[in-house]
């Protein structure tokens, strides 16, 4: 059990109706500080409405929200929103403000000193791969969609709120930009420490970013759990069929090396000296199968010669201390993945 003081967000029996149409129905969840919850579901299922109830952009008809243990109705809205960053798909940058001015807008409103605002702005732009000397003085229309999205994120992070709400933040981007921004986003240390609620209808995005996923349909929670639980222990047919089309790709992103190690050959049948071995292909067991396949493919393209096969080396996790390093080639990895899948899918 998590104590209520370490809970960043508690939503209790939230409901919202527009006319006769119930768009959110009896939704409850608790989100510990530092977790990322993804709200997923088909268009119109109520994700945005639910998200906007958290910072009181929408008032529920029934139920309540508590932030850090305090009922949001008992605090001034301005105070509440100061602690909650908000990023939307349309970005909403101020067109006549430069990039630096856009990022600094909230800290300035909070009365922070100009030098402090400038330092924070520079730091964030640099972290989001927008060198301030090049981009700080530009205007939003001079940036690409992906760059604007990063400025929107920098602006939401500027005042260092402990909670960030993101509504389809990558929705307007092409698939390639989208995938690369998502990777940057995942690796951003600043965000890892925060409590994040993210709305998307993109299943891969949900699986890559979520600690837990709430799958909604017609305003009702279908399942709330880890990506692994939704994929391998679907609560009903809606959940099962929602992931069906992308099942293999999700399995590759959900299972990790640690899940397949037990199904690998106990001894490598190739002499170690024939392998190209460097710090780059020694992997911790937490790496996903998808990432391992990508690395093995790159290594194969670079290093494979006659009689050689590219391998990665997997560090033993604690439960496997007798095997310090296990070597895995692509065929071995795929075979082990297949066997692990059979196990995990057996009820
Ligand atoms: N202010 C409003 N007035 C009337 N109906 C609304 C209002 N806001 C949302 N709705 C309706 O509520 C339902 C849920 O909308 P919501 O935007 O929460 O869904 P969503 O899951 O975020 O959808 P999408 O993925 O398409 O953005 C929709 O049918 C929408 O038309």
Image: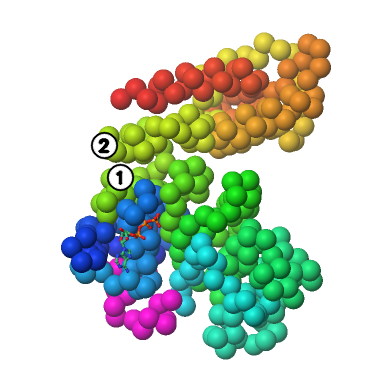
**Residue linked to disc 2:** 236
Secondary structure, mark 1, is: strand
Magenta segment, which residues?
64-81
Taking the image as shown, residue 152 lies to the left or right of residue 310, namely left
Taking the image as shown, residue 329 lies to the left or right of residue 74, namely right
**Residue linked to disc 1:** 223
188 above or below 269?
below
Question: Could you give the CA–CA distance between mark 1 and mark 2, rounded to whole angstroms?
Answer: 8 Å
Q: Find residue 179 and report its horizontal and vertical position in percent.
A: 60, 47
Taking the image as shown, residue 194 lies to the left or right of residue 280, namely left
Is residue 193 shown in magenta? no
Q: Residues within 10 Å of mark 2 (few under 14, many from 20)?
A: few
Residue, x 52% and y 65% (percent of image)?
A: 90
Q: Find residue 331 and report its horizontal and vertical position in percent.
A: 61, 17
Quarter of the image with the C terminus is: top left
Residue, x 68% and y 27% (percent of image)?
A: 296
**Do the numbered discs 1 and 2 sit on residues whose CB atoms are within 8 Å?**
yes
Is residue 66 shown in magenta? yes
In this view, the residue in front, 19 or 241, is 19
Q: Find residue 72 and report its horizontal and vertical position in percent.
A: 32, 75
In this view, the residue in front, 193 or 299, is 299
Q: Which mark is residue 269?
A: none
């Amino acid at each position: 059990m998590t104590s209520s003081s370490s809970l960043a967000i508690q939503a209790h029996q939230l409901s919202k109706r527009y006319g006769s149409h119930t768009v959110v129905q009896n939704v409850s969840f608790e989100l510990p500080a530092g977790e990322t919850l993804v709200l997923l579901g088909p268009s119109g299922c109520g994700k945005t409405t639910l998200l906007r109830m958290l910072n009181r952009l929408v008032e529920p008809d029934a139920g309540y929200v508590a932030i850090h243990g305090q009922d949001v109705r008992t605090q001034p809205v301005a105070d509440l929103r100061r602690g909650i960053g908000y990023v939307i798909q349309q970005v909403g940058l101020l067109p006549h403000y430069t990039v630096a001015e856009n990022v600094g807008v909230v800290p300035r409103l909070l009365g922070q000193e100009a030098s402090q605002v400038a330092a924070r702005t520079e730091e964030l732009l640099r972290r989001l791969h927008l060198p301030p000397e090049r981009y700080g003085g530009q205007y939003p229309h001079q940036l690409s969609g992906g760059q604007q999205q990063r400025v929107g994120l920098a602006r939401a992070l500027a005042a260092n709120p402990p909670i960030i709400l993101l509504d389809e933040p990558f929705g307007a981007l092409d698939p390639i930009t989208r995938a690369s921004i998502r990777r940057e986003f995942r690796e951003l240390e600043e965000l890892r420490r925060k409590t994040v609620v993210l709305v998307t209808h993109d299943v891969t995005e949900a699986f890559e970013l979520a600690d837990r996923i709430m799958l909604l349909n017609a305003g009702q929670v279908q399942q709330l759990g880890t990506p692994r639980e939704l994929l391998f222990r679907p609560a009903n047919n809606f959940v099962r069929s929602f992931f069906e089309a992308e099942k293999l790709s999700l399995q590759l992103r959900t299972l990790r090396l640690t899940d397949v190690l037990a199904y690998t050959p106990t001894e490598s049948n190739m002499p170690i000296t024939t392998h190209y071995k460097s710090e780059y292909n020694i992997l911790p067991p937490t790496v996903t199968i998808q990432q391992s396949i990508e690395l093995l493919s790159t290594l194969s393209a670079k290093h494979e010669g006659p009689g050689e096969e590219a391998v990665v080396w997997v560090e033993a996790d604690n439960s496997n201390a007798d095997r310090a390093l296990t070597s895995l080639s692509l065929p071995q990895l795929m075979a082990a993945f297949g066997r692990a899948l059979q196990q995990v899918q057996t009820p």
